[in-house]
Image (cartoon, helix red, strand yellow):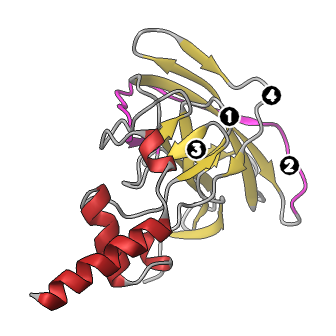
Amino acid sequence: MSERYSKLFSLPENLYAEGSPVIIAAGALLKDNQTGRVIAQLKLRNISPKIIKAATVSLFPLNTVGKPLGETVRYEYLDLNSTRDTDFGSKSAILMPDITTRSFSAMVAEVIFADNSVWNANDATWETLKNSETLTSRLDSEMVKQFRIEYGSGAKNFFLEQKDLWHCICGAINHRGETECHFCRKSVCELKAIDINTLREHKEQRLAKEREK
């Protein structure tokens, strides 16, 4: 039996515009093989300290060669209760009016918070965020162990700054004005001061003591 839906297109992951309270974590375009309809789905992630109760997105349909196709599609996510670091939207199907749509671009136009304050995108540019490097991608097992001894067992990535965000070693995303990670409470000043050469020296000292024992 054939699959009900075929994937036509995937958005780049983790699209972000400076100042936005959300990230477009993922997006896909699907064809319903029973009805012929084409639908889009987005997964949005709240990176704001505030609870989000509604959000509006704009999708720009494109044809098979990436040319604009018809009018912008707007969609509202309502009755949300999205707290920081939680995702929403992935179960909502956004119907594309033209069945020849084969890709799309997307942006978040507006976010409404539980306190009734509003964020508007205006002319924000949405670009892909870089992924933090994992500790294991650059360090051997003993260096990873030393890193976690000094900076906590939850450390898994290298510290990263981009746009108006900083990515903690625990994986959490924080805003430039935050002086400590909202998740693990590590100080941004401490994380900026991490020195791999010093860690390497401490590792050698630890291993020497372990060999003596």
Q: Secondary structure at mark 3?
A: strand
Label 4, label 3: how far apart the Cα atoms are: 23 Å
How many neighbours does mark 3 have within 10 angstroms: few (below 14), some (14-19), or many (20 or more)? some
Mark 1 = which residue?
18
Q: Residue at x 24, y 61 (%)?
A: 153
Check whether the beta carbons of the residues at disc 4 and disc 2 lie within 8 A of each other.
Answer: no
Q: Secondary structure at mark 4?
A: loop
Whichever of callouts 4 and 3 sits on the residue coming sooner in the sequence is 3
Is residue 198 something that shows in the picture?
Answer: yes
Whichever of callouts 4 and 1 sits on the residue coming sooner in the sequence is 1
Task: Name the quadrant of the N terminus.
Answer: bottom left
Q: Where, by quadrant of the figure, is residue 126 drawn?
A: top right
Whichever of callouts 2 and 1 sits on the residue coming sooner in the sequence is 1
Callout 4 amino acid: Asp
Mark 3 = which residue?
94
Task: Name the quadrant of the C terminus.
Answer: bottom left
Q: In x, y percent, where is residue 68?
A: 88, 49
Q: In x, y percent, where is residue 189?
A: 47, 40
Label 3, label 2: how far apart the Cα atoms are: 16 Å
Of discs 3 and 1, which sits in the foreground? Answer: 1
Of 190 and 39, the residue lying toward us? 190
Check whether the beta carbons of the residues at disc 3 and disc 1 lie within 8 A of each other.
Answer: no
Dot label at residue 123:
4
Q: Secondary structure at mark 2?
A: loop
Callout 2 amino acid: Leu
**Does residue 133 belong to the magenta stretch?**
no
Mark 2 = which residue?
69
For this view, does 57 lie left or right of residue 99?
A: left
Whichever of callouts 3 and 1 sits on the residue coming sooner in the sequence is 1
Label 2, label 1: how far apart the Cα atoms are: 27 Å
Q: Which residues are magenta?
A: 66-89
How many neighbours does mark 2 have within 10 angstroms: few (below 14), some (14-19), or many (20 or more)? some
